[in-house]
Image (cartoon, rainbow, N blue to C red):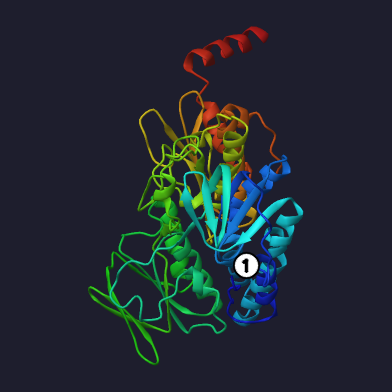
Amino acid sequence: MSPPKLLPDDVHNRELVSQVHPAGWLAPTPVDRYNLVVIGGGPAGLVAALGAAGLGGRVALIERHLLGGDCLNTGCVPSKAILHAANIGMPFSEAMERMRRIRAGIGHHDGAERLRGEGVDVFLGSARFTSPETIAVGDVELRFAKALIGTGARAFVPPIPGVETAGVRTNEQLFELTELPERLTVVGGGVIGCEMAQAFARLGSRVTLVDMLPRVLHREDPDASTLVEEQLVADGVTLRLGASVQGFEATATSRTTVLADGSIESDEILLAVGRRANLDLDLERAGVAYTKRGVTVDDRLRTSNPRVYAAGDCIGEAPFPPAQFTHAADHQARIVVKNALFFGRSKASDLVVPRVTYTTPEVASVGVTEDRPGLTAWTVQIAETDRGKTDDATGFCRVWADDAGRIHGGLVVGEQAGELLAPLTLAMTHGLTLRHIAATIHPYPTRSEVVFRVASAWNRTRLTPRASTWLQRILRWQR
């Protein structure tokens, strides 16, 4: 299978491809039966393959495109590199070259040679099930005791008139740009849309963000959405919210996004309206149930074929909330290794999965982020902390907890919010309460004080009138 060519065809992209889909790669001679065959070389597949091989298993991994998956090649790594460059005012051409250099520098971690060195048989090509216990890649058939579907997802392209002919880009083509578009239209006010709208505005594009919903980041707390919207506008982004896209048109000099109440002229269009699982694997031959959303799994990540598991973005129907994040795929893969190969009983629903939008301000959340019966929302503004005052910081920390202080969800909005969310995620994972956080010494003055202040606010409610009365009696007795 010929290696794909990444654009632009420069030294960095050639270096990346040489690692994650090397030309002339010779497929190994397959063993009679593998403990685990992994389809997909993204985060889930890599973690499972390396983990199982490291424990002594016979493992094969199949990848049809680029090892490293969306995260390395068209998602997390390039987008965060561009965001950093935009935030420090780097020129566009330098920012894109730097991104490609960083991506190539990371590539060897996910590369074919590294996998082979760790004992994984790497097959580059398209996989398809041929039976409930065999997978073909090219003209080679692999027998397995267990298999993992880790094929991830791709950008969803809805059937909007003109979407196929107007040169519309998704994240899969966005990072091919070598010249800054003077005008950029971003369709979609979710994570990718907001991050890239802000980045390109700071890099110098005139950006218009369009979404059919009345606010950006609609899955997050409205207060978080408001702060992000305000900053987007301050960065020069024009927001067209509650707007329905009717079609796309292109001429020799521009591209047009047609709305119900007008149109937007631009040089480039980024479509960021969701993702769709990669499922072209002849799943019926394996007896693996799926829907248009993805592969159906149980809480232990088994499919309807007990030999076959799934992890990562390709999961559809499941008894736990969807979580299309690299870190979720990583931990789901670890569950698969335990459950599939070592008779484990781990459940995906036990995972506490945080999420972060890397705009300015960052929006980081975990668990419940809305008011529910039996829970109280505790909020502290970052500006109320001493470090917040010294840094002119904005944003807030909000925690949803029950009367016993058990944390059911948390939200942090502000600079480095993703880092500040970590103690709340740790607490939820291990059953710690706000009482434990309030009893933990936090260094002063740091931004982490905002989490401590939330816990302290809850802690003060434990001083009931009855307890206060007894304390006052003790103090009077000591006079």
Image: 105 above or below 426 = below
* Mark 1, secondary structure of its residue: helix
- To which quarter of the image does residue 9 belong? bottom right
- Residue bearing mark 1: 81
- To which quarter of the image does residue 455 belong? top right
Residue 371 makes an appearance in the image:
yes
What residue appears at the point 55 percent right and 45 percent down from the top-left corner? 147
Instruction: Choose between 3 and 441: the one closer to the eye.
Output: 3
Instruction: Choose between 427 and 160: the one closer to the eye.
Output: 160
Task: Name, please, the residue furthest toward the right.
Answer: 117
User: In the image, what residue type sits under mark 1?
Assistant: Ala
Image: 412 above or below 97 = above
Quadrant in which the C terminus appears: top right
Residue 216 is situated, as x and y percent measured from the top left of the image, at 39, 60
Residue 435 is situated, as x and y percent measured from the top left of the image, at 58, 27
In the picture, measured across the screen, residue 31 lies left or right of residue 244, that is: right
- To which quarter of the image does residue 233 belong? bottom left
Instruction: Choose between 97 and 125: the one closer to the eye.
Output: 125
Residue 290 is situated, as x and y percent measured from the top left of the image, at 38, 47
What residue appears at the point 64 percent right and 46 percent down from the top-left corner? 32
Quadrant in which the N terminus appears: bottom right
What residue appears at the point 49 percent right and 39 percent down from the top-left corner? 301
Residue 176 is situated, as x and y percent measured from the top left of the image, at 55, 77
Residue 327 makes an appearance in the image:
no
What residue appears at the point 28 percent right and 68 percent down from the top-left corner? 243
CA neighbours of label 1 inside 10 A, class few (<14), some (14 to 19), many (20+) = some
